[in-house]
Image (tube, grey):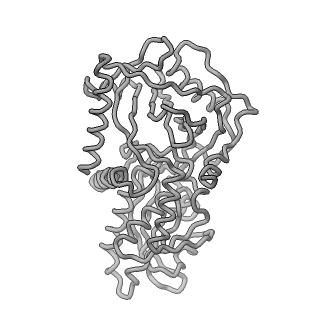
Amino acid sequence: MFNYVKKLLILNVMCSSIVAASGGMVTLTPPDLSPENFIGYNIGHRPCRSKGLRLEHEWVRASNGKEKLLVHNYGHGGAGVSLSWGCADMVEHIIFDNVLSVPGLDTKSVAVVGAGVIGMTVAHILLERGYNVCVYAQATTPDTMSNVAVGVFSPDLGVSMDDAIMLESIKQFAKQAMGEIVNKHTFKGARLAPGYYFSDADIEAANPEDCKMVDFGFGVEPRLAAFRGVITVDIPFYLQDLYEKMLERGARVERCVFDNKEAIFDLPEDIIVNCSGMASKKLFHDDSLYAVRGEILYFKAQPGVDYRLHYAVPGSDVFTSLSTWDDRIIIGGSLERVVDHYEVDEDMCNGLYGNIQNLIKPGCAPDYLSTDQLVPADYCNVVLRDK
């Protein structure tokens, strides 16, 4: 926790000293978001739950009558990457507190269902603490829904839970864990980046010295933003590193598809952790689970564009964000509750595109992405293999 806070403070001081000479003004290298630099779009479904994050256990019986411990870990919404380590820590505590309740239980072998960021972080924590782990999953990185995440560390992002004390503990552990990953480079892809938040709420909550006038260099009036350091995660590299190091630590991975929860109960392990995300709606008949869809636009990476922008569109509840990975610029921000829909929404994509252009070059007519240009981006999977 200390390293996390220390590095954020250092980043804030460094950036504050840079802009102090110009009276609190910071000039950012503007991104070139012309259609020629557009790579493609992607669509992600955030696994939200009206009853809040589910992190609890139950006792179930296999078809042979064997009693087993099942721990649920799903419903993280858009905070899966952010809360993953805190939830994994809590999963291990739940296991430790309950495994001795039933005589004859194999207390050292654990089945983890799901190989997204939630399942892999659970596997890492359990491996570190002496458990044998087998991960059962239909898909692994780079083919999971976690690979579509933008990867901004935001543990306070609107996730609820009945147990407020447990949720706060999860957040604190997550902050400490991700801070150590950045500080010690435990896994690839996580870094500290300068973040500029163009919203009344963020500006009002910030200290005056952390509010900056931001100029993108087009001769237009600079805009006021709250500045703070933010951890960003280059998702393809981070997840690939999680996966490879999970295998190095001794985890086994088996590809499989579960048609019902009984098939999960019949796994050979006596302890099972359900990290199946949206699949829990069907497998465990959880009707409180629903998807919140988000459009993501990818543009080519550009020198000097290594920051995060968060823009709340004035007079609305719409926000748009710009983030960066090593190999691309990412624009996102849409929130649409859906059942199951992966077709491109041209209006939504161009809404996001236009919003960020209006932030950077207010008053200028924004570019528009045509139907022919809005093609799915295989890029997020191809880049990793090429490198």
Q: Quadrant of residue 163?
A: bottom left
Q: Residue at x 51, y 21 (%)?
A: 360
**Number of marks drawn:** 0
- Residue 197 spot, x, y in % from top left: 40, 29
Left or right position of 177 against 366: left
Location of residue 83 with respect to 222 vertically, above or below: below
Q: Residue furthest bottom?
A: 104
Residue 303 showing in the rendered view: yes
Q: Residue at x 61, y 19 (%)?
A: 366
Q: Residue at x 41, y 25 (%)?
A: 198
Q: Residue at x 46, y 35 (%)?
A: 306
Q: Nearer the viewer, residue 186 or 109?
A: 186
Location of residue 57 with respect to 68 vertically, above or below: above
- Residue 106 spot, x, y in % from top left: 40, 84
Left or right position of 34 against 163: right
Q: Residue furthest right?
A: 372
Q: Nearer the viewer, residue 31 or 320?
A: 31
- Residue 313 spot, x, y in % from top left: 48, 23
- Residue 372 spot, x, y in % from top left: 76, 33
Residue 171 showing in the rendered view: no
Location of residue 186 with respect to 29 vertically, above or below: below
